[in-house]
Image (tube, helix red, strand yellow):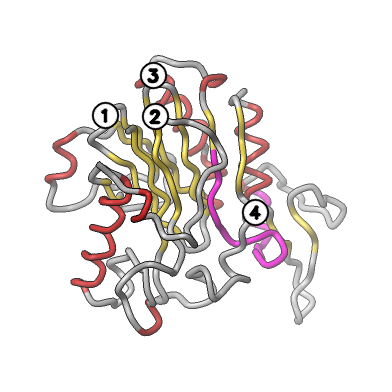
């Protein structure tokens, strides 16, 4: 059985009251990695000690109370329905979202600036990695649809929680990102989710609000509750890893499982 003592006091917890679900997002705290990866790095591609990463991932499984599948995330909107055999593969499946309807199979979403979103339904859970490409491509909509099919529920039965990601005051993007979200002729007057702020050279740039964009899409789907998304990985360097701040600095994980 999982123990609450295994969840570090600094980790993030969803604010929902769902006794059939166990979920959290790690921070930098609570692991065994050292140096720039101090201490709870779960990423295998950042030149950390493989034994330390394995120990940190084992800690995640123990805290979750179930083995979690770490996906090979590729910034696409495809969703995997997790099965026991996926844990035995030599190479992680290439998906950015997964659904589980088994208490013995947890979903793990890696993050270090992109937005991780966890979903809880009465008889299933899911997780999605929502960087701007996946978000614009429909990864959240696809995850909700897959969870409804797998858990035989409606969007109104699902709770969603957004973890930590790069915040709207520092996430600088170009016109290509605005175009991906349906703004083919970006305007400096469009301030809802994109704040116009040219760079030092005077080139047009915007500050994008990933949690705001995600919340709008989730609420449009009719979910029961949408919460979280108030932490900035880039700005809070003592608490979170950030890919934009330090590319090899480490990765966090948002994990969820049915109890």
**Mark 1 residue element:** loop
Real-space CA distance between mark 2 and mark 3, rounded to the nearest whole angstrom: 19 Å
Name the mark nearer the viewer: 2 or 4: 2
Left/right of residue 98 with respect to residue 237 in the rendered view:
left
**Mark 4 residue element:** loop
Query: Where is residue 245 shown, x and y percent of the image?
Result: 54, 76
Whether pointer 3 and pointer 1 mark residues with C-beta atoms closer than 8 Å, the reply is no
Counting residues from the start of the chain, the first of labels 1 and 4 encountered is: 1
Task: Say which residue appears at 79% left-offset and 47% top-offset.
Answer: 192
Residue 201 on the magenta segment: no
The residue lying furthest to the bottom in this view is 35
Counting residues from the start of the chain, the first of labels 1 and 2 encountered is: 2
Q: Is residue 52 above or below residue 111?
A: below
Residue 153, picture quadrant: top left
Real-space CA distance between mark 3 and mark 1, rounded to the nearest whole angstrom: 14 Å
Q: Is residue 133 above or below residue 17?
A: below
Left/right of residue 184 with respect to residue 75 in the rendered view:
right
Query: Where is residue 98 shown, x and y percent of the image?
Result: 35, 38
Q: Which residue is mark 4?
A: 230
Q: What's the magenta region?
A: 161-179
Real-space CA distance between mark 1 and mark 4, rounded to the nearest whole angstrom: 30 Å
Q: Which residue is mark 2?
A: 20
Residue 29, picture quadrant: bottom left
């Amino acid at each position: 059985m999982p123990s609450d003592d295994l969840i570090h006091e600094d980790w993030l917890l969803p604010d929902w009251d769902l006794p059939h679900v166990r979920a959290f997002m790690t921070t930098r705290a609570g692991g065994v990695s050292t140096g720039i990866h101090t201490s709870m790095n779960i990423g295998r591609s950042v030149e950390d000690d493989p034994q330390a990463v394995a120990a940190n991932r084992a800690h995640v499984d123990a805290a979750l109370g179930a083995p979690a599948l770490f996906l090979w995330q590729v910034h696409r909107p495809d969703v995997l329905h997790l099965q026991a055999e996926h844990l035995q593969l030599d190479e992680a499946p290439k998906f950015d979202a997964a659904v589980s309807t088994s208490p013995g199979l947890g979903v793990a979403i890696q993050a270090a600036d992109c937005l991780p979103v966890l979903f809880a339904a009465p008889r299933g859970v899911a997780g999605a990695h929502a960087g701007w490409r996946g978000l614009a491509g429909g990864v959240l909509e696809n995850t909700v649809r897959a969870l409804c099919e797998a858990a035989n529920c409606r969007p109104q039965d699902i709770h969603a929680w957004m973890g930590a990601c790069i915040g709207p005051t520092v996430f600088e993007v170009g016109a290509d990102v605005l175009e991906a979200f349906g703004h083919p002729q970006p305007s400096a007057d469009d301030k809802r989710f994109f704040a116009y702020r040219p760079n030092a050279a005077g080139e047009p740039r915007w500050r994008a609000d990933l949690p705001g964009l995600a919340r709008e899409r989730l609420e449009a789907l009719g979910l029961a509750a949408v919460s979280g998304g108030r932490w900035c990985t880039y700005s809070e360097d003592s608490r979170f890893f950030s890919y934009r701040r330090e590319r090899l600095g480490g990765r966090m994980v948002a994990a969820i499982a049915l109890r």
